[in-house]
Image (cartoon, rainbow, N blue to C red):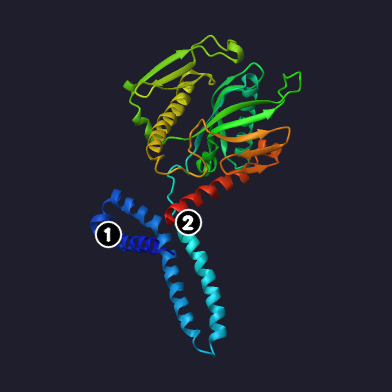
Amino acid sequence: MKKSLINRLKKIKERMIELETELSNPEITSNREKLLKLSKERSEIYPVVETFDEFSSVSEDILVAEDWLSDPELKQEAQKELDELKTKLCLIEEKLQSLLLPKDPNDTKNVIVEIRAGTGGDESALFAADLYRMYIRYAERKDWTSEILSSNESDLGGFKEIVIRLAGDSVYSLLKFESGGHRVQRVPATETQGRIHTSACTVAVLPEAEESSQILLPPDELRVDVFRASGAGGQHVNKTESAVRITHIPTGTVAECQDGRSQHKNREQAMKVLIARVQDKETQIQQEKIAHERKSLIGSGDRSERVRTYNFPQGRVTDHRINLTSYKLEQILDGFLDDFSNNLIAEHQANLLAEINN
């Protein structure tokens, strides 16, 4: 292991000792806020310190075993033990590196998924519906709950746009790499000449904002418009102004909802989407500032970036960020996304590890 990493681990252990001293201080234990903050920090670094202690212990055992090699009577046994210890040390080192990976604070959050039809007209809207079903099936396989926040249907049964909420365990960590351009190649149902068309949709996966985040959007920064809801092709749905559009004036961010039966419900749903979009916009700005310093191997995160192609004639799906191709198109569209999500996460972690080791 590199000396720089060992020095970093030593500093983490020193911090653990400091924390244990502070947590035994009556002034800290009587202050609930400080106690919770320091206890949380201790719980976060404890696995690192525990594993580093194990690393140090095995490293010392290796030195002892190497000394035994000079004794002819112990050499064979010492070599066997040395090989086992080195294998064990490698596994501990991998675990330590994994523990040192930067944690994404959003990984445990629920998400808001926005799917928008792009180039390709009606075929793009139909593909948006395919993507919607794919994520719903994936959510079902993960025992997540799903909810449509807003939708705009096309004449042929697709979606010009659909926004859904998925809730459960580690939703954002598994879906965050779905953001980007999704392209489909197939013969549309409306194509009479049998020609293959290429259409595209964009997907945005936003971490759901905490309830307390609503204070970030003061009422005087919001403009709320109500209007009559309409269905596919502009068909009239009801005669009351139940649809709601909310605009965050400082950023120009807009969210609307007309799927609910009441104005109150639509306003609540639109606010959820608006808060997530505003926070996501702030995150995108921050990421752009550091993009020139570090660019992920799995893509820039640009929502316009082409991330995946679904080729129906060949029955294949290709993720362009990690050059992974699967010939299980039907299964993937039925929600079997683990091959892609697991490989994307692994590539991301490998990228982070490379940065740690530089």
- Residue 96 is situated, as x and y percent measured from the top left of the image, at 46, 60
236 or 87, which lies in front?
87
Name the mark nearer the viewer: 1 or 2: 2
> Which residue of the protein is positioned furthest toward the bottom in this rendering?
73
Q: Residue 178 location in percent, x, y?
A: 55, 37
- Structural crowding at the residue carrying mark 1, measured as other residues with C-alpha within 10 Å and reported as few (<14), some (14–19) or many (≥20): some
Q: Position of residue 6 (x, y in %)?
A: 39, 64
| Residue 160 x %, y % | 58, 21
341 relative position to 196: left or right = left
Of residues 49 and 293, which is closer to you in this image?
A: 293
Of 24 and 66, the residue lying toward us: 66
| Vertical placement of residue 30 versus 132, above or below | below
The quadrant the C terminus occupies is bottom left
Please tell me whether mark 1 sits on a helix, a strand or a loop: helix
At 72% from the left edge and 36% from the top edge, which residue is drawn? Answer: 315
Q: Residues within 10 Å of mark 2 (few under 14, many from 20)?
A: some
Question: Where 278 sits versus 42, above or below?
Answer: above
Label 2's element? helix
Residue indicated by mark 2: 98
Q: Are marks 1 and 2 in contact (CB under 8 Å)?
A: no
Q: Earlier in the sequence, mark 1 or mark 2?
A: 1
- The N terminus is located in which quarter? bottom left
Type of amino acid at the residue the image marks with label 1: Glu
Query: Residue 70, which numbered label?
Result: none
Q: Which residue is rendered at x = 61% and y = 30% of the image?
A: 183
On the image, which quarter does residue 14 sit in?
Answer: bottom left
Q: Label 1, label 2: how many angstroms apart (C-alpha)?
A: 28 Å
Residue of label 1: 22
Asked if residue 292 lies left or right of residue 114, the reply is left
